[in-house]
Image (spheres, helix red, strand yellow):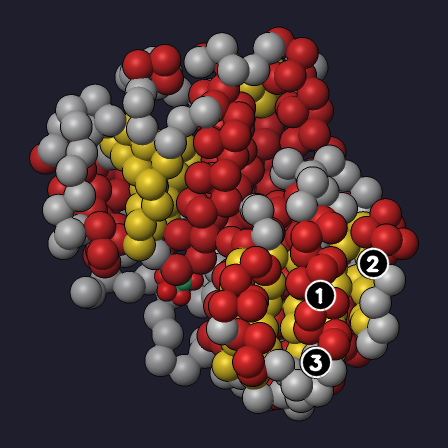
Amino acid sequence: ALVDKANYRHFMAKEIHEQPEVVGHTLARYVDMATERVTMPVKLPFDFKDIQRISITACGTASYAGFVAKYWLERLARLPVELDVASEFRYREAPLRKGDLAIFISQSGETADTLAALRYAKAQGAHTLSVVNVPTSTIARESETVLQTLAGPEIGVASTKAFTCQLMVLASLAVAAGKARGELSDADEAKLVHGLVEIPRLMSEALTTEVQIEKLAREISKSRDVLYLGRGTSYPLALEGALKLKEISYIHAEGYAAGELKHGPIALIDEHMPVVVIAPYDKVFEKTVSNMQEVAARGGKIILMTDAKGAAEATIQSLVTIVMPDMGATFAPIVYAVPVQLLAYHTAVVMGTDVDQPRNLAKSVTVE
Ligand code: G6P
């Protein structure tokens, strides 16, 4: 299919803005909005009650979707999850038992390392389930179960809408697993599904932060390094934020678990180092605030992405706050992905890089 940029300057901008719509499409395939139940579009060839552990494997941005899913599956379904990048998983001979569940996440469905990891898991007798955007891809064809993301064609090399659609599918799967294992009641399921149904609207609201982020991007573009911090499900999002920024703006960026700050990266902080803190007001918010205080005390410039409650509670100077819509904490990473992507995008635009085709990168990596 021929895809154009519509009125956008880059495919990436178009794809960021399409997210409320395509995440909504994806959601409609995995939940029944009327009854507020999760409905897998295909019958799973295993019962979650029989699964003892899950391994998740992917590359790049898809691996960060997997990392968020680890938190969800462990919390909602009490299933232990191991997460690997495919280039490691395929060679380290990870012991899988027959009947284990191995999940693979890939936009293209053609990434060579992810495909090799899938073949390895299959040979070990594991159930293989893949979350892919291209249903005719090799990974989709070779997987026992395919859960499709309905992001539509993604042209920008840096993944955006595929990522949030992957999160939507994985969130639904985690709720289904929790339900099947008796960890979630009907009422819990309804509440969680209700939360998922709200997400497209919340993403549209999150897009209104763009004007503010555009201004901020001019500041960020003057930096040599940027640090991203988060706790809980915001930690993988910090990793994704740093990846997005470095791949399209070529500014060095690192994502860290907020609690690890004192074990190294704090040594780098001075007034030239912006620190992006992703922190919806949740159970670990106070802990993250104390990490922000450590940054502020060393003159670091903080960019805080939080909600109104968090903004009111975080009394720290030298702070730019991006105020996000109020929402439950569980699925916040799907919505917080939006400002994270916008910041990378606008910084790259200021830098004048080739946003859709960054140097040295390929959309689909079919070689090792
Ligand atoms: C490349 C792309 C990334 C993508 C990764 C995995 O590095 O530039 O945006 O996240 O491959 O691709 P996949 O198609 O397997 O999701």
Tell which of 178 and 316 is nearer to you: 316
> What separation in Å lies between label 1 and label 2 (alpha carbons)?
9 Å
- At x 56%, y 15%, the residue is 184
Residue behind mark 1: 292
Tell me, yes or no, whether the two marked residues, 1 and 2, touch with CB atoms within 8 Å.
Answer: yes
Q: Is residue 254 left or right of residue 336?
A: left
Up-down relation of residue 331 to residue 268 (above or below): above
Residue 8 placement: quadrant:
bottom right
Disc 3 element = loop
- At x 64%, y 16%, the residue is 188
Disc 1 element = helix
Tell which of 159 and 72 is nearer to you: 72
Residue behind mark 2: 314
Tell me, yes or no, whether the two marked residues, 3 and 2, touch with CB atoms within 8 Å.
Answer: no
- Labelled disc at residue 298: 3
Tell which of 88 and 28 is nearer to you: 88
Three-letter residue code for mark 2: Ala
Give the mark nearest the N terminus, 3 or 2.
3
Residue 125 placement: quadrant:
top left
